[in-house]
Image: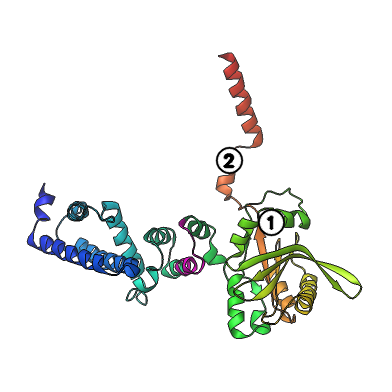
């Protein structure tokens, strides 16, 4: 009851009146700027809430009272639940930590829905990481479920990290774009393969799950084919996987290896890229790029191998199944334990 008396002071009433005025102002903005107007309002409200909780003597429960008052005043307007008011405050505090960003935050954040904004701040540790996912969402028009998948697969940490020679083999604008499209490692945890899988089994598995594979590759990859034949001299050669990148306007040759990276792999891919440039590349296409996907690599060996290669390529690893921490592994039951429990369960059922 004391809380109720405290938060009905003139200061609180004046602030509530000011919020109502700002809501009405935001509602009058044009339909094309609805999300911008909403987020501008949310940002200013987040500023107010943070400051009032810090400085005003209204007690810890004033957000619930504010929620009740605003929902009563604007019954047809969503966004004033206690839960969302807390989220607005958290959203503001998250981005206000970066002094270089907070001055004009809505300019970029308004390009994605509010639910996407909340998903990002709930799963990211830094403003840099969050803005990466904001930009990727804008570029690729991700749904919230796809956005969450990309965050949980740690796309931020994997993007642009592959060993490559793009700076030496491509002009500046394209080298930067090419670096952005390659990850390390690639996450193929949607595949189920035997322990001693072959390159052909890996290739077929990726194509059988082409939608998931394309999502992991990223926006812009268009599938051309597998085991694409190329004739050089009197011999036939076959590319494991061939794509065309619609943003880079170039072919992308992907070679799969079920072993550790070896220097000769780069030489072979260099040969394939040359063949594609000579036989498939057309006017308007930029230089073909190669990606070596290996089970593992020694970074120094890979860097040495690519240093004298004249065609643009990158070397990345792939992961089929994420490994569990040792403490979780030890906590999991063995196959024998599971079978023993099932057998005991059957005996108990028969006994009944």
Estimate the spatial distance between the alpha carbons at disc 1 and disc 2, rounded to whole Å.
29 Å
**Between residues 71 and 5, which one lies in front from this camera angle?**
71
User: Residues in magenta?
Assistant: 132-144
Taking depth in this image into account, of 94 and 273 the one nearest to the observer is 273
Can you give x and y, in whole percent of width and height, for residue 109 in the image?
A: 38, 68
- Residue 275 shows in this picture: yes
Instruction: Please name whichever residue, 327 or 17, is drawn nearer the observer in this view of the structure.
Output: 17
Whether the magenta-drawn stretch holds residue 51 is answered as: no
Question: What's the magenta bit mostly, secondary-structure-wise?
Answer: helix
Q: Is residue 323 left or right of residue 124?
A: right
Position in image of residue 235 (x %, y %): 90, 71
Label 2: few (<14), some (14–19) or many (≥20) C-alpha neighbours in 10 Å: few
Does 325 sit above or below residue 340? below
The residue where tag 1 is placed is: 206
Where residue 110 sits in the image (x, y, percent)? Answer: 37, 68
- Foreground mark, 1 or 2, reads 1
The reply, left or right, for residue 35 in relation to residue 47 is right
Type of colouring: rainbow
Look at 9% across and 55% down and name the residue there: 8
Write the residue at 37% across / 77% down.
100
For the C terminus, the image quarter is top right
Snapshot quadrant of residue 347: top right
Compared to residue 7, the image places residue 173 above or below, namely below
Mark 1 and mark 2 residues within 8 Å of each other at the beta carbon: no
State the residue in front, 54 or 16: 16
**Does the image show residue 161?**
no
Q: Give residue 332's mark.
A: 2
Please tell me which residue is depicted at 12% across the width and 60% down the height of the picture: 12
């Amino acid at each position: 009851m004391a809380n109720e008396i405290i938060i009905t002071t003139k200061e609180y009433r004046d602030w509530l009146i000011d919020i109502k005025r700002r809501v009405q102002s935001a509602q009058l903005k044009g339909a094309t700027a609805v999300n911008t107007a909403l987020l501008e309002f949310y940002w200013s409200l987040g500023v107010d809430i943070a400051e009032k909780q810090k400085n005003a003597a209204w007690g810890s429960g004033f957000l619930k009272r504010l929620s009740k008052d605003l929902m009563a005043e604007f019954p047809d307007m969503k966004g004033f639940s206690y839960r969302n008011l807390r989220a607005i405050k958290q959203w503001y505090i998250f981005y206000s930590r970066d002094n270089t960003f907070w001055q004009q935050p809505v300019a970029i954040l308004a390009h994605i829905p509010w639910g996407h904004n909340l998903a990002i701040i709930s799963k990211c540790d830094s403003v840099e990481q969050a803005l990466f996912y904001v930009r990727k969402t804008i570029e690729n028009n991700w749904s919230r479920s796809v956005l969450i998948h990309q965050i949980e697969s740690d796309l931020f940490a994997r993007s642009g990290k592959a060993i490559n020679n793009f700076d030496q083999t491509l002009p500046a604008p394209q080298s930067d774009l090419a670096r952005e499209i390659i990850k390390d490692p690639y996450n193929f945890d949607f595949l189920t393969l035997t322990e001693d899988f072959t390159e052909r089994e890996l290739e077929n598995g990726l194509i059988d799950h082409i939608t998931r594979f394309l999502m992991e590759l990223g926006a812009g990859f268009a599938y051309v084919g597998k085991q694409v034949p190329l004739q050089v001299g009197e011999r036939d050669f076959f590319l494991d996987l061939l794509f065309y990148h619609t943003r880079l306007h170039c072919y992308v040759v992907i070679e799969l290896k079920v072993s550790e990276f070896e220097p000769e792999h780069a030489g072979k891919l260099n040969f394939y890229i040359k063949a594609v440039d000579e036989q498939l590349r057309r006017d308007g296409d930029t230089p073909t790029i190669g990606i070596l996907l290996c089970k593992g690599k020694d970074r120094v060996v890979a860097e040495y191998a690519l240093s004298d290669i004249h065609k643009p390529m990158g070397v990345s690893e792939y992961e089929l199944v994420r490994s569990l921490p040792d403490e979780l592994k030890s906590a999991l039951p063995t196959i024998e334990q599971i079978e023993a429990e099932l057998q005991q369960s059957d005996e108990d059922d028969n006994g009944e």
